[in-house]
Image: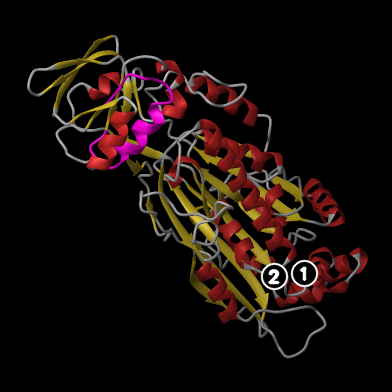
Amino acid sequence: MILDCAVIGGGPAGLNAALVLGRSRRKTILFDDNKPRNAVTSESHGFITRDGIHPQEFKRVAQEELSRYPDVRIEKQRVYRINKENTFFQVETENGEVYSAKKIILATGFKEVLPDIPRVEEFYGKSLFSCPFCDGWELRDRPLAVIANDQKAFHMAKLVSNWTNDLIIFTNGNKILSLEEQELLKRYGISINEKKIATFIGENRMLKKIQLEDGTKVLREGGFISVEWKQAASFDSTLKYTLNEHGGIETDSWQRTNTEGVFACGDTRISGPSQLIIGTAEGSMAAISVITALTEEKFNQDKQPLKRRIYMHHPHGKNSKEKVSYLESPERRKEFSPEQLLNMIPLKETDSILDFGAGTGYFSIPVAKRTTGKVYALDIDAAMLAIIKEKSLKEQLSNIVPVQGSMEELPSPEGTIDMIIASLILHEIQPLGPLLQQMRNVLKKEGHLICLELEPKGSSDKGPRITLEGMEREMKEAGFQVTEKYFPSESLYMLVAQRRD
């Protein structure tokens, strides 16, 4: 199965993106290694109806809501690598599993690098914070500190003055404020202390005093720290998106990065306040942008989409009766008998097989006699599958599983099929690349794809054809390696290809 979207990161932005995707019936996997930035936080604020909620409770409720949508799956593991291959993204997890997705939403957030001050981590998240909009109310009217050793000090002090009239800026041994800035701050009762901080003093993570390097202790009951932001994502990637001056991923207003098919939202962008409500809103916008892109791609497909549908439902323009007559004809069997061809492929006794475009069971029936594994006979024509069922009953074959529909209807997870046989069918699929990608995904590592096709010979009323060279090129681009080439008849070629990892 090819995912519509892979969401990397299970925080508020990623969760809301998955929700919107699921409600739009888009096949989605949310990857979450459960290492949130706000792990030290006991309450999240500023989200109407959820003000004061514990971050883990927010996450629990969100995941419970996502479970209502069958197209959304949560994988609790870390993404190890993301690469773009042709038009699809290959997402590899730390467990070695590989998923293909049409679009990627990056919602991994960032991690905070605190200043190198003894005991700072002990108080951070309880009485020392980074965002006054998130936690200023809880510290209102207390003697507070703004701790910053860069130009953020001036701006942050002005903001924090909304919650207290007792405020001191600690620059931790640095002179960063101009005389004009100092005068303005003092005019509003904001003090400035440029001595180096030795440690923090308090109990149960509640700050009581700030001890300076000269031994002075200053009474403070909380405060806000200027922290350094770094991308939390730890995966390898060939994605070439642009970072802004803060180290965040640059996007437009639709959350699109400059890499086609890659979107970013939430704290990953590091472009403003890291509030819960902002992250979820950006996640929603990223999902809407993904859905819009997928919808436009669907309706903008060129190369005769209507003609393709006709071929898929009525190969070679035949009705069901004519189709059966052709598929079961002695001439066809004489030209390439299934038994002869099965002797040429690396079929094992326990292999599971997918017969793609099974028709009347031309290959499904003889294959089922040679293996104890399941043989999935996949076809969109119910009349063909009825014939296969009748034949399997007559031959007393219990390992054939008729499947009506496309690859998405295959009742088999990715990486579980040993071999796919596609006989005189792949030339009807336009574009072919996405289907070959799906086939690669359902195959086990080193699994095989067997392709039989007729070489084009001038004009034909039997629909489009594809040359051996063209088919080999398509397979290579989709992640296959052709290992054998056969010519069973003058006009027929057979390629044996193996999944390449």
Q: Give the residue at the far left of this rendering.
A: 214
Q: Is residue 411 left or right of residue 129?
A: right
User: x, y (%) of residue 80?
Assistant: 39, 46
Say what amino acid the circle numbered 1 marks.
Answer: Pro
State the separation of the CA atoms marked 1 and 2. 8 Å
User: x, y (%) of residue 423?
Assistant: 69, 67
The answer to whether one can see residue 372 in this image is no
Q: Residue at x 65, y 43 (%)?
A: 21
Residue 152 within the magenta-colored segment of the rendering: yes
Magenta stretch bounds: 148-168
**Residue 267 in the image: above or below residue 362:** above
Say what amino acid the circle numbered 2 marks.
Answer: Gln
**Residue 398 in the image: above or below residue 238:** above
Q: Residue at x 61, y 46 (%)?
A: 285
Which mark, by number, is residue 360?
none
Q: Is residue 235 left or right of residue 336?
A: left
Q: Which residue is mark 1?
A: 305
In which quadrant of the rendered view does residue 434 lie?
Answer: bottom right
Q: Which residue is mark 2?
A: 430
In terms of depth relative to the viewer, which is nearer, 83 or 413? 83
Q: Which mark lies nearer to you, 1 or 2? A: 1
**Residue 111 in the image: above or below residue 475:** above
Are the residues at dot 1 and dot 2 in contact (C-beta closer than 8 Å)?
yes
